[in-house]
């Protein structure tokens, strides 16, 4: 049986608990004031050796991507984590004020995504040692504690929905599935 923990806004716990599909052990916890705090609260309910973290802002996740991220972590026992990521295609500029001060080498830059899988102890240690509110993803916290985090290439369809235009693209992609 699969098990999932989701962190939801206060007051919505029962609503989300009722949405669990058959065969899924679901535990619903109250989320925190920040993404990092919500992950930390969810971690309190995890009893497994490995944990995968996923943001609801990426609704087009596939079981294949989750499996690939977890498989890479299983295959690399020296790694503390593995994240889904995509190479960036835009040219990235560093700016001070309104002036460009540097251009980054995009051949070395990847956009971090979820899911992100970790050895549970490594993620717990990372959350204990860093201010959670400052973390934009969990890999950042694990990296800062010295843990090695690998990447698993993600398909373009694993997009983040943050704008109305993103939502329209997601709807089109879902219609094609």
Image (spheres, grey):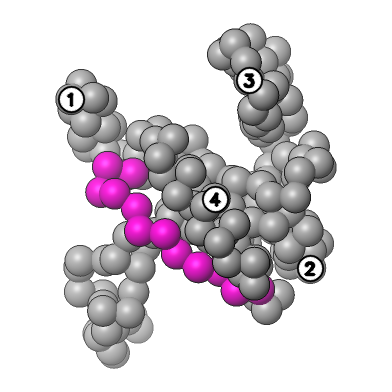
Magenta span dominant secondary structure = loop
Tell me if mark 3 has few (under 14), some (14-19) or many (20+) residues whose alpha carbon lies within 10 angstroms of its own: few
Give coordinates of residue 163: x percent, y percent.
30, 39
Res. 84 mark: none
Instruction: Work out whether residue 48 can be spotted.
Output: yes
Quarter of the figure that contains the N terminus = top right
Q: CA distance from mark 2 to mark 1?
A: 43 Å
Q: Nearer the viewer, mark 3 or mark 1?
A: 3
Instruction: Work out whether residue 127 can be spotted.
Output: no
The boundaries of the magenta stretch are 147-159
Q: Nearer the viewer, mark 4 or mark 1?
A: 4
Tag 3's secondary structure? strand
Tag 2's secondary structure? helix
Res. 176 mark: 1
Q: CA distance from mark 4 to mark 2?
A: 24 Å
First reached walking from the N terminus: tag 2 or tag 3: 3
Quarter of the figure that contains the C terminus = top left
Res. 129 mark: 2
Q: Which residue is mark 4?
A: 70
Q: Which residue is mark 3?
A: 24
Give coordinates of residue 55: x percent, y percent.
51, 41
């Amino acid at each position: 049986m699969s098990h999932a923990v989701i962190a939801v806004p206060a007051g919505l716990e029962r609503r989300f608990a009722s949405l669990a599909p058959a065969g899924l052990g679901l535990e619903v916890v109250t989320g925190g004031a920040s993404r990092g705090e919500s992950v930390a609260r969810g971690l309190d309910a995890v009893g497994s050796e490995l944990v995968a973290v996923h943001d609801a802002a990426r609704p087009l996740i596939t079981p294949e991507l989750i499996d690939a991220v977890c498989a890479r972590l299983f295959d690399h026992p020296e790694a503390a984590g593995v994240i889904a990521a995509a190479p960036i295609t835009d040219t990235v500029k560093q700016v001070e004020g309104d002036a460009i001060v540097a251009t980054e080498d995009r051949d070395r830059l990847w956009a971090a995504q979820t899911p992100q899988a970790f050895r549970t102890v490594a993620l717990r240690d990372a959350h204990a040692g860093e201010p959670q509110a400052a973390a934009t993803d969990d890999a950042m916290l694990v990296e800062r504690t010295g843990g090695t985090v690998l990447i698993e290439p993600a398909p373009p369809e694993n997009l983040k929905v943050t704008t109305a235009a993103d939502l329209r693209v997601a709807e089109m992609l879902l219609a094609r599935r």
